[in-house]
Structures are given as C-alpha cells and as structure tokens.
C-alpha cells in the first residue's frame, strides 16, 4: 500500500492531484479502484499505481494538424 505522497512522486504529479482524483468518485473508480480511506489518509495499492502512465506533461496537448492551415 502507498500513501498519496508516494503515489504522486511515482507518477510525477502533485500530491494535490492525487487527492482530487481520490475525492472524485468517477476518477477514483477509473484510476484507483482499490484505494481505501482510513480517517483522513488514503491507502492506494501498488497494483493500481503500476497501471497508470508516469510523467504526464502539464497543460493542454497540441492540436492535431496545427501549423498546416490552408
């Protein structure tokens, strides 16, 4: 089991992002379906973390075909 801080470090995102995902039921089901809250702390299974991509880039992704105006 991992804490929100450990998960954030592994995924290269902020601790706040992890907490937001866990507190949103839809996001929690899709990203961390087996996470459990004990008091105010979350415990996240390593198996849930291993299936997620690491090092997301910040900001909006570039539009496809940008720079090819006719």
Image (cartoon, rainbow, N blue to C red):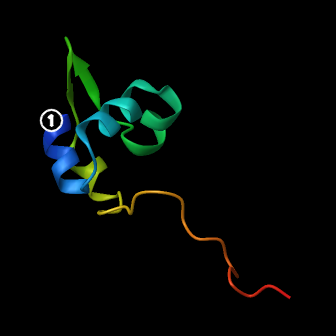
Residue on which the image places disc 1: 3
Residue depicted at x 86% and y 88%? 70
When asked about the image quadrant of residue 22, the answer is: top left
Does the image show residue 1? no
| Quadrant in the picture for residue 32 | top left
Q: Identify whether 41 is placed above or below 49.
A: above
Position of residue 58 measured from the top left corner of the image (x, y, whole percent): 40, 58
Of residues 38 and 9, the one drawn nearer to the viewer in this rendering: 9
Residue 6 x, y percent position in the rendering: 13, 44
Quadrant location of the N terminus in the rendered image: top left
Asked whether residue 13 is in view, the answer is: yes
Which percent across, then down, holds residue 27?
48, 37
Residue 52: where, in percent of width, then height?
35, 57
Which sits in the foreground, 15 or 70?
70
The quarter holding residue 11 reads bottom left
> On screen, 57 above or below 7?
below
Q: Residues within 10 Å of mark 1 (few under 14, many from 20)?
A: some
């Amino acid at each position: 089991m991992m804490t929100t801080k450990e998960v954030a470090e592994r995924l290269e995102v902020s601790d706040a992002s992890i907490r937001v995902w866990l507190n949103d039921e839809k996001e929690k089901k899709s990203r961390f379906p087996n996470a459990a809250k004990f008091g105010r702390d979350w415990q996240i299974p390593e198996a849930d973390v291993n299936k997620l991509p690491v090092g997301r880039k910040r900001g909006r992704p570039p539009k496809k075909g940008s720079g090819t105006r006719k």
